Amino acid sequence: MSRTHKIAIIPGDGIGRDVIPAAQQVLDRAAALCGFTLAYHPFDWSCETYHATGRMMPDDGITQLADHDAIFLGAVGYPGVPDHISLWGLLIPIRREFDQYVNLRPVRLLPGVPCPLANKKPGDIDFWVVRENVEGEYSQIGGRMFAGTNREFVEQTAIFTRFGTDRILRFAFDLATKLGRNHVTSATKSNGIFHSMPFWDERFAAIAATYPETRIDQYHIDILAARFVMSPERFDVVVGSNLFGDILSDLGPGVTGTIAVAPSANLNPERKFPSMFEPVHGSAPDIAGKGIANPVGAIWAGAMMLEHLGETEAAALVMHAIESALADPATPRTPDLGGVGTMSALNAAIVEQCGKQK
Ligand code: NAI
Ligand code: MG
């Protein structure tokens, strides 16, 4: 019997329902070539589910997912349901309950993708953003009083634990070591944020001291954002808190041309719980159902999932298929890449490339 991986599929909303089935075709092709099977278990949790049931996922949703090797998600959020409901009703509970404390996003300029920065070629921009994914600025701690009056006030508290800070920093250093690129950059703002960011800097220095072979630098988030645009070549691994990492991990793909090709992994590195893989983009209501969504972000997320499942050869096949399809001028391109092609046509080209390499 060949190996089987149990995958929970949550297409979600909008183009999530377009790109996930497309990506599955590519993953299945790679799996067939490498002699294993992906057994998919679909879940229809979405804003539509919310309209019908008042919940983004059932009460026992987390338990239903727990028994899978990985979760493959499209996008959640749609006009008509406030974004904080879709986010806090599905994505954030999954990230927290499964302790997916690392959000890992590659930033790489792919061939055939027009770069908004002048004179950059594929390979020039190639680094990783490591975002803390379960604490920090995204907390429910705080409150609102005297709502609707002149005395109204809100308080929002950021949470930085030593445990949570140290483990994300260590992950970043370990990743740099694994990649053979011993250089880690920390995103901070210890000049303006009085308590949490000086603490973050302290822990960065403490963890860095245990990786003496790794070069370090740190920048305040404002100038770091500027450097992402002005000199993206200088980065290898960039680590940031939940909020800073969130912004940087969209800015990074932005400077490589389009967020539509960018993937994201929500990892529980200890593998006690399933990790979750998704494209960076959202549900894109403006193009949903039109058949023109770019499937590359979802496919690349699928490649990261294969890598996590230990299917390194299949992951490499998928990445190579993406790159060779995009590098070929004859490949149909979706409108976000400046073409007039459909998602299916671009996807078919990637599936075909996947076959060619074996
Ligand atoms: P978005 O990523 O959905 O769309 C931004 C722009 O990029 C749109 O013009 C869209 O057409 C384009 N775009 C995005 N993905 C594309 C693709 N694969 N191919 C071609 N073009 C693409 O972000 P937006 O509009 O801010 O959010 C829409 C909804 O998605 C909201 O409800 C939001 O909360 C949700 N969202 C969900 C995320 C998730 O599930 N992780 C992440 C980001 C947004
Ligand atoms: Mg984001």
Image: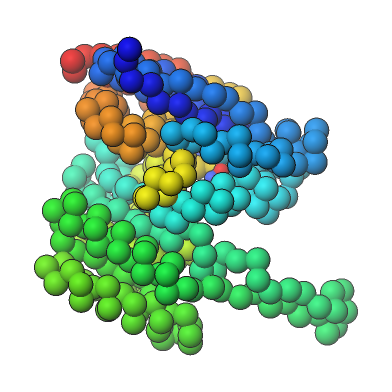
Please name the residue shown 67% across and 35% down the image. Answer: 46
Query: So how many labels did they put on this image?
Result: 0
Q: Quadrant of residue 59 in the image?
A: top right
The correct choice, above or below, for 93 with respect to 202 in the image is: above
Residue 219, horizontal then vertical, whole percent: 32, 75
Image colouring: rainbow
Which one is in front, 112 or 4? 4
Is residue 323 in view from this perspective?
no
Residue 144, horizontal then vertical, whole percent: 77, 74
Query: Is 103 left or right of 92, judged from the image as shown?
Result: left
Q: Quadrant of the N terminus?
A: top left
Q: Residue furthest right?
A: 149
Is residue 65 in view from this perspective?
yes
Please name the residue shown 54% across and 38% down the image. Answer: 66
Query: Is 55 left or right of 199, judged from the image as shown?
Result: right
Which one is in front, 134 or 85? 134
Q: Quadrant of the C terminus?
A: top left
Query: Is 156 left or right of 133, judged from the image as shown?
Result: right
Residue 207, horizontal then vertical, whole percent: 27, 73
Quadrant where ligand 1 appears: top right
Query: Is 24 left or right of 234, judged from the image as shown?
Result: right
Which one is in front, 118 or 9? 9
The correct choice, above or below, for 273 with respect to 350 in the image is: below
Please name the residue shown 51% across and 48% down the image. Answer: 98
Residue 113, horizontal then vertical, whole percent: 31, 37
The correct choice, above or below, for 254 with respect to 349 in the image is: below
The correct choice, above or below, for 140 with respect to 252 in the image is: below
Please name the residue shown 25% across and 55% down the image. Answer: 175
